[in-house]
Image (cartoon, rainbow, N blue to C red):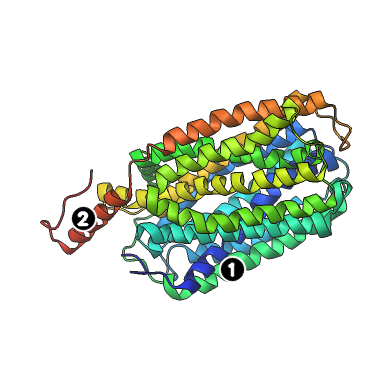
Amino acid sequence: MAFVDGPLPQKLKFIHGFGAVAFGVKDSGFSFFLLIFYNQVLGMDAGLVSLALGAALLVDAVIDPILGNLSDRTYTRWGRRLPWLYAAALPLALAWAVLWNPAIDGTPSFWELLGIAIVVRILLSACEVPSVSLVPEITADYDERTTLFRYRYLSGWIGGIIMMLLAYTVFMPGPEGMLQADGYSMFGIFGAVMIFISVVGSAVGQHYLVAKLPDTRPPPFSLAKSFSEIHDAFSERAFIIFALGGLAAYVNQGMTFSITNYVNLFVWQFERIELIIYPIALFVSVVIMFFVVGPMHRHWGKARSAVIGSLVAMVLALAPYALFIGGFWPTPGSVQSTTLVFAFLVVANLFGIVVMISGSSMIAEIVEAYQERTGRRAEGSFYSGNWFVQKCATGVGILLTGQIINLAGMPEGATPGEVPFEVLRDMLLLYGVVTVVLALTAAYWLGRFPIDRASHEARLKALDAAARGDIDAGTIVP
């Protein structure tokens, strides 16, 4: 039985979504700044940086399903999820600050970066997996689940955009500021404060609703039993189909985010004002998305919306690079060039987020499909599985970016405006080819997701009838 039956209170939507600010801070840091900070500022080889970040993701991804299973098994008067949020918030904030303030003389080693990156990602999982697992517990409604994810993504993007704005205007303003170490130190400390307030604030705000003793006490934990349950959950057909599409979409996202600052600085030759406008343009796209994704889901459903979003985002994201390579783009750094970059960015990013929201919301429907088959709910296992897919994929995306940069011959300590055209062309061509493959793969698999609105609602009726012992009330959906 969901915590809320019917329309969700507006306050709950805001409070639940506020918890995703922490994820946005992390995503902004890892995706946009960490590679360039450790490579161009601290002097680590780009390939080693991307390898360390990718390895950290893989280690964390293995641990995530265990965290999700433990979250499902948690049995306290505060429910299954809140104890994790309260316990992990402060250690996560401290680890985040350390990541951007390495107490190391000279260039950090591969192992030093790997160690702190693993700690940060595991602690973030201990917050994010329980938080997002509350969505199918709060409501069973097909559209209200999308609403909660709209607020989560809006809050997450706001958190990330705030950090980007502060990075470009306060902590390391201008292209030269992004190549100085001091600003990254304050970037990390401020982000740590935002992370702590987000996680704890959201937990406190939802405490009145979800702090209840679970209906059933789980069996004692054992590693063998945990892995058996995880394997069973991940074998759900709908989850496998989602995972194949999500894998491609997340690799694409990780690659796109981690290459962004290289493109902005060395291809489009953004100055301080353009770097300030960039996160504002992202924010505009997120606001438009907030009002677009709901009608898309109501009209086309989640799977078809994901397909549309993947294809449109691919075309609009790559169009500026194709025009630049072909010699049809205005002079980089000019008003015309900058205006066009932001116009394409707003619409492409809008549809890219539609893909992510559609996928995240699909997972909520897998919970009832699994419950129907096994009699057990496993929100934490499925959303940790999503994180498993996302982190492996994002790690691969960052790894690909590092290799693309190396293969293109991007020099360390490069100066905007002085990088040869051939280097930029090769970087964009390699990125473009990989993007097309990934976007088409994501569209194919997400479009095959087997649960639509009608089958979900029929399943809810059948589960409700079974819970009431009314064996004639409905037929279980295959």
How many numbered tags mark residues here?
2
Position above or below: 31 against 50:
below
Q: Earlier in the sequence, mark 2 or mark 1?
A: 1
Horizontally, residue 39 falls left or right of residue 445, namely: right
Residue 65 seen by the camera = no
Q: Is residue 289 left or right of residue 423?
A: left
Residue at horizontal 72 percent and vertical 57 percent from the top: 163
- Front one among 92 and 249: 249
Q: Which residue is mark 2?
A: 462
Q: Is residue 21 above or below residue 63?
A: below
- Three-letter amino acid code at the position of disc 2: Ala
Q: Residues within 10 Å of mark 2 (few under 14, many from 20)?
A: many
Q: Residue at x 57, y 44 (%)?
A: 60
Q: Secondary structure at mark 2?
A: helix
Q: Quadrant of residue 155?
A: bottom right
**Residue 160 location, x and y as percent?**
66, 56
Disc 1 secondary structure class: helix
Asked if the residue at tag 1 contacts the one at tag 2, i.e. Cβ–Cβ closer than 8 Å, the answer is no
User: For mark 1, what is the residue?
Assistant: 200
Residue 33 falls left or right of residue 70: right
Residue 178: give x, y in percent of width and height.
83, 48
Q: Left or right? Give the position of 418 relative to 320.
A: right
